[in-house]
Image: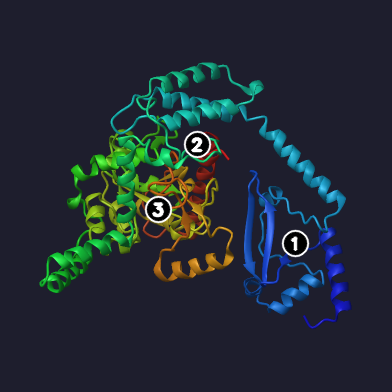
């Protein structure tokens, strides 16, 4: 800007030489005034982050003209700092200006990564095979049985193991999987055309309408009900119907109900254990919701100890669009009672605004849900007797990052839940919902403009409107229904935080937080190849 064509050309050549020499990070400015940095992810996916030039300038305390001048004059300008490990796992190449040596280095690193994936870690592979063997041996119950989709996940995992790295027990494991599929009660039913089993051929309209068995129709209707229940459509329709039926008393009754909701939310315990309904918690509707995906909760280590002598804070990752794996833990259909026989029903935390919506609030209170506030969590975790809560730590910000086969958490800056655990002495339990992000396509994942508007709305309303695409009721392409993708919630070992501390120090919080992040990474790395392969 403000330079003659000759000066601009000279500055561009200088910047190109600096990039070629590796002195200047690659910042590409386009005509819309945005800067984008591209890099190759460590697991084959392309990681992308976009910021406007104004955002970059604001972070550095500069003007937009200063940023452009720095880029043009080959002065070092880094929009974000990467750790040494992140730098080792990323390859940033601009094919227009990269030297031959840089290209050869990038190709060599990519080939080394491909070769390393052909040689799985023997110790990790042994743990994965042991886990599948235990899952096959677990006796089926009313709320916990292996689905045909999970058996197929195990089968495909075994088929990906290189012959030279196959453990001795792999052959027997494959036979057990095949036997379990042959005797599965769902083996003779038509399969959904919405499955993600590597078949790229789209299912026909007839298979979505005419060949759907009755059981799967009931599952679809339940998911339709649950989707409307969590949104404003059913609430508005119900209020409009009651308003019409109760005329001319509608305004007075509606005013009384609003006053009651306000008073009740201010005075009742949160959560209200006296309003927990065992019958509603064990209703068949939740088993239909579980089997729609299908969904399964399991322990990373079956011998992990959970007793009634302490409290537990279950932390769920990732948020996804709906956090279906976390919400299901409020019901008996998740198998929570079988997995944790010594613990009473847990309290799943949700948005505060849900407790102001007719019908939705009554449903949540009957499931012992809370409002995800610090006060609510402390109230639950301080009761003792094995009390527990389920918290989706990433919140609305993490929901905006949900996209199929992407595993992104908002965790580095989230330390409030660690502080609450230290104040109450509750053990932290990491969980990962494999498949949670696969239910919807995020239409805004590559749009910085939409992402900025979502972030602004999220800061104002505490939740973010998402632009997503799933499936329809009578079609497999387009719609707001979640796709039929298996969800597997793997529950890690509890992390002991010691005795309760009234005012934990920042160093203590950071110490436990780092330990928790390490546990989450290990949990994801151990089971991702089984339940969420790229």
Indicate the position of residue 395 as horizontal and vertical percent values. Answer: 43, 57
Q: CA distance from mark 2 to mark 3?
A: 32 Å
Indicate the position of residue 104 as horizontal and vertical percent values. Answer: 83, 45
The residue to which callout 1 is attached is 26
Q: Secondary structure at mark 3?
A: helix
* Mark in the foreground, 2 or 3: 2
Q: CA distance from mark 1 to mark 2?
A: 36 Å
Q: Secondary structure at mark 2?
A: helix
Is residue 491 among the parts visible in the rendering?
A: no
The residue to which callout 2 is attached is 531
Q: Picture quarter containing residue 283?
A: top left
Local crowd at mark 3 within 10 Å, few (<14), some, or many (≥20)? many
The residue to which callout 3 is attached is 422
Q: Residue at x 54, y 51 (%)?
A: 408
Left or right, 395 with respect to 94, comes to left
Is residue 189 among the parts visible in the rendering?
A: yes
Residue in front for this viewpoint, 403 or 268:
403
Q: Is residue 507 above or below residue 208?
A: below
């Amino acid at each position: 800007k403000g330079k003659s064509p000759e000066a601009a050309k000279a500055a561009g050549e200088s910047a190109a030489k600096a990039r070629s020499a590796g002195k200047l990070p690659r910042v590409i400015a386009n005509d819309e005034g945005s800067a984008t940095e591209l890099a190759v992810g460590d697991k084959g996916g392309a990681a992308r982050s976009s910021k406007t030039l104004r955002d970059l300038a604001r972070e550095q305390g500069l003007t937009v003209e200063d940023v452009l001048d720095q880029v043009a004059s080959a002065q070092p300008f880094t929009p974000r700092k990467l750790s040494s490990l992140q730098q080792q796992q990323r390859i940033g190449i601009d094919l227009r200006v990269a030297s031959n040596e840089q290209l050869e280095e990038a190709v060599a690193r990519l080939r080394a990564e491909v070769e390393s994936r052909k040689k799985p870690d023997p110790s990790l592979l042994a743990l994965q095979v042991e886990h599948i063997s235990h899952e096959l041996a677990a006796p089926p119950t009313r709320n916990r049985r292996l689905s045909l989709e999970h058996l197929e996940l195990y089968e495909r995992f075994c088929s990906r193991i290189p012959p030279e790295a196959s453990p001795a027990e792999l052959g027997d494991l494959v036979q057990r999987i095949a036997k379990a599929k042959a005797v599965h009660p769902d083996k003779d039913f038509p399969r959904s055309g919405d499955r993600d089993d590597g078949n790229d051929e789209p299912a026909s309209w007839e298979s979505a309408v005419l060949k759907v068995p009755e059981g799967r129709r009931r599952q679809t209707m339940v998911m339709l009900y649950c989707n409307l229940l969590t949104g404003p459509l059913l609430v508005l329709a119900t209020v409009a119907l009651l308003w019409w039926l109760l005329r001319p008393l509608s305004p007075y009754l509606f005013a009384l109900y609003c006053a009651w909701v306000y008073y009740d939310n201010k005075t009742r315990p949160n959560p209200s254990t006296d309003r927990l309904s065992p019958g509603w918690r064990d209703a068949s509707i939740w088993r239909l919701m579980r089997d729609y995906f299908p969904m399964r909760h399991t322990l990373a280590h079956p011998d992990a100890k959970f007793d009634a002598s302490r409290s537990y804070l279950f932390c769920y990752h990732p948020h996804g669009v709906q956090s279906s794996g976390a919400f299901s833990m409020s019901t008996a259909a998740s198998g929570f009672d079988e997995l944790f026989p010594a613990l009473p029903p847990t309290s799943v935390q949700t948005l505060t605004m849900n407790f102001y919506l007719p019908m939705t609030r009554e449903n949540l209170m009957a499931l012992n849900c809370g409002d995800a506030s610090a006060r609510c969590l402390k109230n639950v975790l301080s009761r003792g007797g094995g009390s527990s809560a389920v918290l989706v730590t990433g919140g609305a910000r993490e929901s905006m990052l949900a996209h199929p086969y992407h595993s992104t958490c908002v965790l580095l800056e989230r330390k409030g839940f660690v502080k609450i655990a230290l104040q109450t002495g509750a053990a932290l339990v990491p969980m990962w919902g494999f498949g949670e992000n696969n239910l919807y396509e995020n239409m805004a994942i590559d749009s910085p403009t939409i992402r900025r508007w979502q972030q602004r709305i999220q800061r104002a309303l505490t939740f973010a409107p998402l632009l997503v695409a799933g499936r329809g009721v009578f079609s497999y392409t387009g719609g707001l229904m979640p796709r039929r993708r298996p969800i597997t919630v793997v529950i890690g070992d509890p992390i002991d935080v010691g005795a309760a501390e009234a005012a934990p120090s920042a160093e203590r919080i950071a110490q436990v937080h780092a330990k928790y992040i390490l546990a989450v990474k290990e949990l994801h790395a151990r089971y991702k190849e089984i339940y969420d392969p790229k």
